[in-house]
Amino acid sequence: EVQLVESGGGLVQPGGSLRLSCAASGFTFSSYWMSWVRQAPGKGLEWVANIKQDGSEKYYVDSVKGRFTISRDNAKNSLYLQMNSLRAEDTAVYYCARGRTYYYGSGLGYWGQGTLVTVSS
Amino acid sequence: QSALTQPASVSGSPGQSITISCTGTSSDVGGYNYVSWYQQHPGKAPKLMIYEVSNRPSGVPDRFSGSKSGNTASLTISGLQAEDEADYYCSSYTSSSTRGVFGGGTKLTVL
């Protein structure tokens, strides 16, 4: 059974940093694109970042470029999101998600339960 | 990286059919057959309902169908059931820097 479990969320002050982790199990982690998607309270979904199977390609939404870094450790079956210079508008539930299949674009077939990040003083 | 355009809300009675539209551009919906649809119930993670425009993952009822014409994709739910009441989001591959974009979401109310 595919499982994605996020951790690392919490309350952080504006300008602070946080590192989210996503522990994957039940599939060959190194074979899939992985993504972070966020949802601000009462708002819609927003794609945050994507990373290719071997980490050689990474893509970010403009609003987080230069502040967030997506990475993965295939040996540890883990996905990460390093978030720096956090702003109030980064407050959201952050979901880790896996592509439906190995090639990119075929939908996010598996999602974690999400971890809440709150940026506030 | 503008979000795809969806109606804010739609409604229908049990047994009826509804269609949710998702309008983008030639850089996303119109340029690729990589449109997906997600269902999200309150407090839950999204669930993939349609991938690559018109394909259903295993376990998704055939009451759910997808299509695309030009820059607009559509999700149709036939034989509406109470449990279909949820938020629905479209998404597409995009040539922009994110490589993925969502619609603003549509709240489906089953009357």
Image: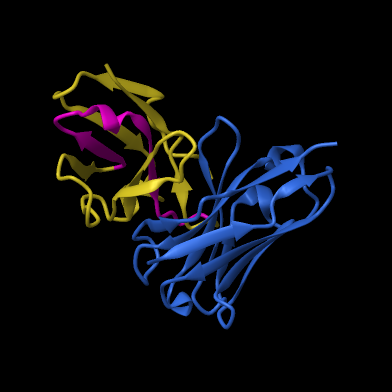
Chain colours: A blue, B yellow
Q: Quadrant of the C terminus of chain A?
A: top right
Kindly indicate the quadrant of the structure image that contains residue A104: bottom left
Instruction: Please tell me whether residue A77 is drawn above or below residue B108 in the rendered image.
Output: below
Residue A93 place in picture, x, y as percent: 60, 44
Q: Which of A10 and B53 is in front in this view?
A: A10
| Horizontal arrangement in the rendering, residue A37 relative to residue A71 (left or right) | left
The answer to which quarter of the image holds residue B79 is top left
Q: Which residue is drawn at 56% across and 50% down?
A: A114
Looking at the image, which residue is at 19% across and 28% down? B80
Give x and y (percent) for residue A109.
37, 58
The residue lying at 22 percent from left, 53 percent from top is B59
Q: Residue furthest front?
A: A1
Between A8 and A46, the one nearer to me in the picture? A8
Q: In this view, does A27 lie above or below A95?
A: below
Identity of the residue furthest to the bottom in this view: A75
Q: Tell me which corner region of the image, top left, top right, bottom left or bottom right, holds residue B18.
A: top left
Q: Which of A42 and A52 is in front in this view?
A: A42
The magenta region covers B71-96
Q: Could you tell whether A117 is left or right of B55 in the image? A: right
Judge from the rendering whether residue A112 lies leftward or rightward of residue B13; answer left or right: right
Would you place residue B34 above or below residue A88 in this image? Answer: below
On the rendered image, what quadrant is the N terminus of chain A found in?
bottom left
Instruction: Choose between B45 and B34: the one closer to the eye.
Output: B45
Query: Could you tell whether A65 is left or right of A106 in the image?
Result: right
Residue found 41% across the figure and 24% down from its top: B8
Residue B45: say if magenta. no
Count of numbered circles on the image: 0
Asked if the stretch drawn in magenta spans residue B94, the answer is yes
* Direction top: furthest residue: B111
